[in-house]
Image: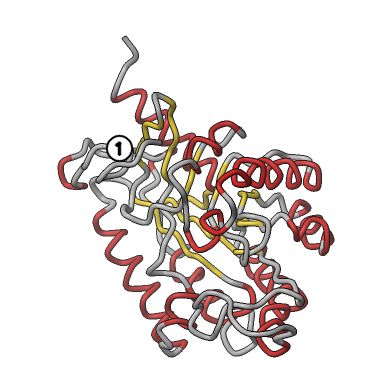
Amino acid sequence: MNPSKYGPFPFSPIVKRPPLKWPNGARIALWIIPNIEIFHLDTPMPGDANERPTGATPMVRQWAQRDFGNRVGIWRIMEILEKHGVRGTAALNSDVCEHLPIIVEECAKLNWEFMGHCKTNTHRVTEVHPDEEQQMIADVFNTIEQCSGTRPVGWLGAGLQETWNTLDYLIENGAKYVSDWVNDEQPYMMDVGGKELVSVPYSYDLNDAAVIWKARKPIPEFERMIRDAFDVLYRESETSGRVMALALHPFMIGQASQIGVLDRALEYILSHDGVWKATGSEIADAFLQHHRAMVPSS
């Protein structure tokens, strides 16, 4: 897309839109996004406040803390989501396919969806040479497809970062939706040089990395935030559908001291009628159907 002062979409206040209708009369699309990430020991790591990588290698404690997520935490998340009948949408670093393929295999057995999430979380699209971004994005989509058997149709950038070219490259590779733009509670259409892309709402608010790690809030506070957010969205969804995205990182929420938050939150949310346990592509498809009904083709 071309540089501009606003995004590739019109400004649209949520109170001025036609009511959004979800399938089967659902009120809320519950979207769970485990971020399955890999960090290499021979590459500088992000710091404790998630600042950009600095320091010499090996950064043993920082690396091992994150490796816990793949050795232990993700398996706890899988167990909890399966218990509640929820399919995850894994934001997957494609290097996981090469180095930790058993995780991808087990996600596929659970019928989880995969979305591209860069090669690793220390290789952001804004930090590679401009000539390399297009190939990097293609490699991510191709690698995940080869490993999982299904080509991703969604994307979440590492650090939610993009360049002016990222959306074009995503569309080139068959992306249907992107989730870097955390500016809404409903999907919306993007116009990228005359080509359509759906923004599916991710969350920087209901995100264990932002709340527990960066803001240093206690675990009970994260659980309270999830419940309070659901209560507001559920009330507002009486007139127009909402997306409730819950962003998870296995090395945080997967800790023995923290996994109970996910279990209790899902039990509370799913005790309500009209909650649709959705994946990213299901949300994008449903919104596209709604959008096209609202804006018939000429």
Given residues 172 and 244, the one toward you in this image is 172
Name which quarter of the figure residue 228 lies in.
bottom left
Residue of label 1: 9
Q: Residue at x 41, y 87 (%)?
A: 217
Up-down relation of residue 178 to residue 98 (above or below)? above
Q: Residue at x 53, y 47 (%)?
A: 280
Q: Looking at the picture, how far across and down is residue 208, in whole percent?
A: 49, 75
Given residues 193 and 208, the one toward you in this image is 193
Badge 1: how crowded within 10 Å, few (<14), some, or many (20+)?
Answer: few
**Residue type, numbered disc 1:** Phe
Q: Residue at x 48, y 40 (%)?
A: 167
The residue furthest top is 298
Question: Left of 188 or right of it: where is 145?
Answer: right
Up-down relation of residue 8 to residue 247 (above or below)? above
Q: Looking at the picture, how far across and down is residue 277, in whole percent?
A: 52, 52
Question: Left of 98 or right of it: where is 191?
Answer: left
Question: Left of 72 or right of it: where is 186?
Answer: left
Up-down relation of residue 194 to residue 35 (above or below)? above
Up-down relation of residue 187 to residue 127 (above or below)? above
Q: Residue at x 42, y 28 (%)?
A: 289
- Quarter of the figure with the N terminus: top left
- Quarter of the figure with the C terminus: top left
Q: Looking at the picture, how far across and down is residue 135, in whole percent?
A: 66, 42
Q: Looking at the picture, how far across and down is residue 91, in whole percent?
A: 60, 57
Given residues 62 and 30, the one toward you in this image is 62
| Count of all numbered marks drawn on residues in the image | 1
